[in-house]
Amino acid sequence: MSMNLAGGLWLTSTGRLARRLLHDFRRARIQGERSAWERPDVASLKVWLDREWNESWPETLPAPDLRRMGAWSAVMEDTPPPEPLEKGVSLCRLLDETYGILVRHGIDPHSGPPSTPLVEWRRIASRRFSSRLADQGYFHPEELISHVPEAMRQQAITPPTDCSVLGFEFPSPREKDLFSFLQKVSNVSFIQPQRSVPGHVTATALPTPEQETTYLCGRLVEDARHIPLHRIGVIVPNVETYGPTLSSNLEDLLGNTPQTGENWFNITLGSPLSRLPLFTASLLPLRFFLEGEKRETLLSLVLSTYYGLRREERHSAARADRTWLKKGVSSGLDELRRCIESTRSKENDLLRDWFERLKELRNSMPSGGRAPSSWIDLLSRTWEIFGFPVLADEQDRLAWRHLSTVIQEFRTDMNDRAMSAAEFVEWFTHRASLERTQPERPEDAGIQIMGIIEARGLEFDKLYLLDMNDHSLPQPVRPLPLMDGSERARVQGGTAESQFEFARVVFNRILHSAPSIELLRAEQDGTKPLTPSPFWPEEPVHRTINIWTDPDPSWLRASWLRAAWERAADSGNNGDDTPSRADRTLSPPSVLHKKLSRGLSPSRLKTALSCPFIFLVKEMLGVEPLEEAEAPPSRRERGERLHRIFASFSDMARKSGIDLVENRDDARQLIERCVSKEFADVADHPGWRLEARRLLGSADAAFPGIFEQWLDLEAEHRSKGWRCLTEECSFTNLTVQECPFPVRGIMDRIDFNEQEGWLCLDYKTGRLPSRGDLCSRFTEPQLAVYFMALREWASSQKNTIDNAPCAAGYIHVKSLNAMEYRIVPCVGESLDRWREIIADMGRLLADGRFDPRPYPFSNVKKPDALCSECPFRTTCVRGLSRDLPAAENGDEEADRDH
Ligand code: SF4
């Protein structure tokens, strides 16, 4: 846009347009090789009004936001709102916005024809609000547009001699009044900066908003090859929604800053201070007390990088959360503290400082209302105690600067009313939500990404208009709940007609903003189909984008995509069974070999059989997905405790000679003793108390205890001639032919029967493996390994029958409905095959072949299904390279097998 700006005042609708005019002016002067020039007087209407008013030595000033909010809040004390409205920040905000809209549209906010009780109340409140502000020497900022012409009439302000007006395609009534006045006292020209003919329009529909932004970013990169960046524009009706995704996609594609020091793109939106992490962190100490001293808030506070207190050790505090979860403690500073102190763990030492200081803070928290400055003082002291803020980068420094401004405003503009801690936090957050933070960068450089209003008057070589759906253009009717029908009819956006008319004018302006315009829309958002805007052309192009399977050249600039795609393509070329390059060259360091030579347990063997890569990551490198912390009793802990109870029961029954078939009372008393001994350290916890009742039963329960039913089964088992010889029987050096490593483990229990021989039994408190997993698919090696170990153990026993047969099975004690003794005969029959599989697996591991290859030696129909639910998928190339089949339904399969 080259415009001769010499002479007079240039008034624009937006600050962006004013800055763009100045930028183009400067550029034209530099290109004309002028060494100096006079700065033209270009300003947005708002800036010009403020400037003129301030320079006239006024006696009253536009009221800052917090002063207005404070005035509305005070007014509501005397003029309470009708039900169901409630006093508070939101209502103050709504009143203030309504007041501003009415003034802007030339409607008297103080009076009018008789209306609804709500509107009458608003008018009374507005009168008191204005008079309260006037007493303090202030007025509402929207009234400035009337005050300035008035001051010109009274010759307190000199009108401009020449005035050019740009970018007011839809002036408000007050703006029209101002321009009419200026026309009487100045030479006013209304400038049409845009092209006289509309640009060429294309339209592209994409399936989802994500694809819409992905497609747009690819197009922008292409355009940037031949169009100066600042001549490319993107108009986004909902910048708040699209801005963050656009910004991160463009940063992926283009990097942060070009070497010239300018910017690749420019989103003027900025972020509200209240959304920045530093602000969220700043209120954590107060929120901890206001929200009931919750575990999560305490943890957020301790782990926050914005607090310096013992920051080097803070990561170890994360372990405290698992302790709280496991012990079921969820809130209360004292409770949380007691729980950690009882563990005598490392985090106890770290958290002691936090507990102490939080206790001090709690003691100094006033219970009633206090002036905002008292709360600010308390907050500042708290920050000092906890070492806040630790600033990491430019964004943090910017946030801290803005936070300091908000604090200052609280001291000066809101100091005349008492508020509770909760009210303080609410007001503080409200004020921060209005504070926009924007990193300093030249606004006129780079691809321009802006909202509909900001785009007023601007011209581009290429322009994109996003989100062309009916919720964006036209926008929905504004709710304006504090206005009556006649007021809404006079307000722009108050009716569907006025929103449509506004959208029509805006769309027409956009069509005249560039020679080439591309309209974009998503057809669906989640499961919701989206309806196109009424201005959407009838014959759009439909496209789909998949950057993973068919990356666009511009997206291949993104290093993360390029790396993943090359890796995936590479893997695809090698075929299914060939490991990738990285895996092929991996040779096991001696430390891995050493670990392996200590022996493979059945559970590690099972992991290796399921996928050698998982074995490498989990068993050799010790990387494990964080276990889901469950409130007590967790499945794992329950299983461990039950195993110990079974072991101690059979051991004590044998040693004390209790006949479990004949002497049921003694058996019951013994199991009760075993349970109470095992649960002694958790007896206070309600979850474990309930578990004890579930196991032992109680007089008032409708069902017997689990152990009562188990004693029946145990008695039945023993009545068949079985006796329990030993429990927790470990083996450390079981040799499997041709396997380079020994196998080791612990057998839960060994029984003997004169007729049947030896029996190894494994207690299972969860799901039982199916017969297929044990004997035909070969995915569960545990029972086969125990069988081999049992044979070795039996051959070492003296005074027993030679060559007695061996067997293996389970004692399944999951619930009353899932309890049985099961001997699995096929395990003995499949031992030869198991030996081959274990030997093959051992050789593979010894060679360092930790291939990402599910079930390399098992008979599983769809081995790749394991990848679809593999927690290590993100570390593994196979997880990226293919569409994975759904996992087989293990339960169904297990049922069939049985
Ligand atoms: S994603 Fe598949 S191949 Fe990769 S580690 Fe997991 S199971 Fe193995």
Image (cartoon, helix red, strand yellow):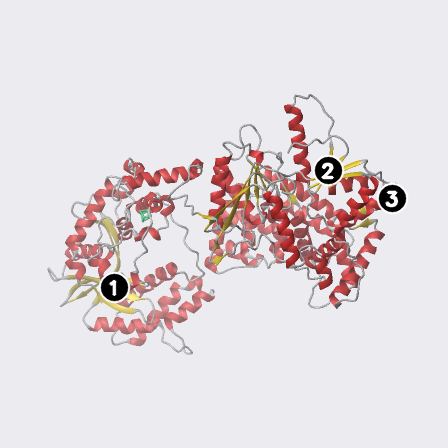
Lateral position of residue 798 relative to residue 253, left or right? left
**In this figure, which residue is indicated by the disc labeled 3?**
153
Which one is in front, 494 or 412? 494
Q: Quadrant of the N terminus?
A: top right
Ligand 1 within 8 Å of the CB at mark 2: no
Q: Which residue is the site of mark 2? A: 43
- Cα separation, mark 1 vs mark 3, equals 99 Å
Residue 326: x and y in percent read 45, 58
Crowd around label 1: few <14 · some 14–19 · many ≥20 (10 Å): many
Mark 2 neighbour density, 10 Å: few (under 14) some (14–19) many (20 or more)? many
Sequence-earlier tag: 1 or 3: 3
Please name the residue shown 50% across and 42% down the image. 216
Residue 810: give its label: 1
**Distance between the alpha carbons at the discs numbered 2 and 1:** 84 Å
User: Whole-percent x and y of residue 477?
Assistant: 63, 58
Q: Report whether 494 appears left or right of 48.
A: left
Of all residues, the one furthest to the front in this rendering is: 197
Residue toward you, 657 or 566: 566
696 to 580, vertically: above or below:
below
**Location of residue 31 in the rendering, given as x and y in whole percent from the top left corner:** 63, 24
Q: Examine the image and state in which quarter residue 895 appears.
A: bottom left
Which kind of residue does numbered mark 1 sit on? Tyr
Residue 312: x and y, percent?
Answer: 52, 41
Identify residue type, mark 3.
Answer: Arg
Between circles 2 and 3, the one closer to the viewer is 3
The span from disc 2 to disc 3 (Cα, nearest Å) is: 22 Å
The residue nearer to you, when weighing 430 against 317, is: 430
Ranked by sequence position, the earlier of labels 2 and 1 is: 2
| Residue 484 can be seen, yes or no | no
Within 10 Å of the Cα at label 3, are there few (<14), some (14-19), or many (20+) other Cα atoms? Answer: some
